[in-house]
Amino acid sequence: MEIKRRKSKIIKIGKVSIGGLNPIAIQSMTKIKTSDVERTVRQIKQLESAGCQIVRLAVKDFSDAAALKQIKTKTRIPLVADIHFDYRLAISAIENGADKIRLNPGNIDKPKQIEAVICALKSAGIPLRIGLNSGSLKDLGNRKSSITDKLVASCMNYVRKIEKLKFDKIVISLKANNVLDTVEAYRLMAKACSYPLHLGVTATGSPYNGIIKSSIALGALLLEGIGDTMRVSLTDNPVEEVRAAECILESLGKSHPAVGVISCPTCGRCEVDLINVVKELEAKLAGEKYKQTGDSLKVAVMGCVVNGPGEAKEADLGIAFGKNHGILFSRGKIVKKISVKDSARVLLEEIKARRKKHGSTIAKK
Ligand code: SF4
C-alpha cells in the first residue's frame, strides 16, 4: 500500500529539511534544565544515537537561552528553543544559535512581541513552530466551540498575524491530550494550510498509555499522508520517545531499521524463556538498531516448531527454539544448535559479523 503524502512546504531546520517528500523527522525533547550544559549535551547525544533528528530544549530563563551557544558547539542535531510567556527569551535563544523557535500562541500573543520575534527570526534565517497545546489555549470568545475548533481557529489566527509580517518559514503543531481531538485538529489544519505539520499528542501519561495513544493518533494521520515531523511524548526517558517513534515509522514502512527483530508472542507450546531472550537481544542492540548504514537485517526469534523454522528461514538470521535449545538459521540455512542462555549473545555476534562484512558496525556490548 502506498501512502500519498500531503503536499507541504519545505522548511529547513539546521541541516534537516522537513515537508514535501522529505522523510518524516523524529523529534524529542531534553528533560534536564538547559543551563546544565553538561547533562543536557549528554542527553542530546543519547537521543542522537537513538535516531533523534531534531531536539527541543526548554528555555525557561536567560541562563537557558545563553546555554544554547555552548550546547550547539558540542552537539550536531538541530536545536529548537521552546519558549513560553516571555518573547525576549526567543530573541536571546536566536542570538545564541537556536535552529528553530517554538512559540505558544496561548501565552505569547501581543502584536509587538510577535513582531520582535519574527524580526529576529528573519535576521537569523530560521523557522518558527507555532505550537498549540489544548492545555494552554486562549479562549477565543466562543465557549461552546470544541477543542479542535479552538485549536484550529487559534492557530489560523496566529498564522495570519505572522503572514502579515511577511514571514512564512512556519511549522505547526496542535496537540490535544486525546487521540480523537488530536487527529481531527490535524486533519482540519492539513486542509487549511500547506505548512509542514509536527505531529504529537500532549500529556499522554505513562509509557504504556503514551505509546498506545501516540501510535493510534500519529499512525492514523501518517496513514492519511499527514505529518512531516513527529514526537511521541512520554513520561519517561526521552530515548524511549525516539524508539517509539522509530517503531511507528517502521510499522508504516517509512523507516527501515538497520536491525529489525521479529519474535513470536509465545504460548503454551513454547518450552524456553523466549521473553527474556528477546529482551536481552533488544537491550544488546539498543542504540544501534536504527543507525542507518546501508544494509538492513531482519532477525527472527521464534518459540517453537509451528512457525519457528518458517520465519527463521525467511529472515536474514533466525532462531527457532525447541526443547531447551534453538536452531540458528542464516539466510535460510541451518548453521548450528545453540543453548537458550547463549542465544542472544550468539545472535549479536552473527549480526556484528554480518554487518562488518557490509562495512557497518555494532557497538561492543
Ligand atoms: S511460534 Fe510456537 S511458541 Fe510461538 S506463538 Fe507460535 S505456536 Fe506459540
Image (spheres, rainbow, N blue to C red):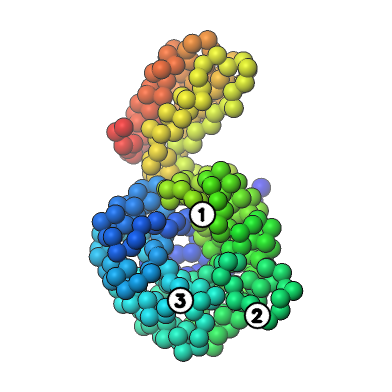
Q: Is residue 28 above or below residue 320?
A: below
Give the residue type that dot 3 points to.
Phe
Q: In the shown orientation, is residue 167 left or right of residue 201?
A: left
Residue 233's tag is 1
Q: Is residue 36 above or below residue 236?
A: below
Look at the numbered disc 2 and give the secondary structure of its residue.
loop
Look at the numbered disc 1 and give the secondary structure of its residue.
loop
Q: Label 1: how many residues lie within 10 Å, few (<14), some (14-19) or many (20+)?
A: many
How far separated are the C-alphas under marks 2 and 1?
27 Å
Residue 74 visible in this rendered orientation of the protein:
yes
Look at the numbered disc 3 and give the secondary structure of its residue.
loop
Residue at the (38%, 22%) spot, across then down: 346
Q: In the shown orientation, is residue 310 left or right of residue 15?
A: right
The mark nearer the N terminus, 3 or 2, is 3
Residue 140's tag is 2
Closer to us: 284 or 105: 105
How far separated are the C-alphas under marks 3 and 2?
18 Å
Is label 2 in contact with label 1 (beta carbons under 8 Å)? Answer: no
Is label 1 in contact with label 3 (beta carbons under 8 Å)? Answer: no
Q: Label 3: how many residues lie within 10 Å, few (<14), some (14-19) or many (20+)?
A: some
Closer to us: 125 or 286: 286
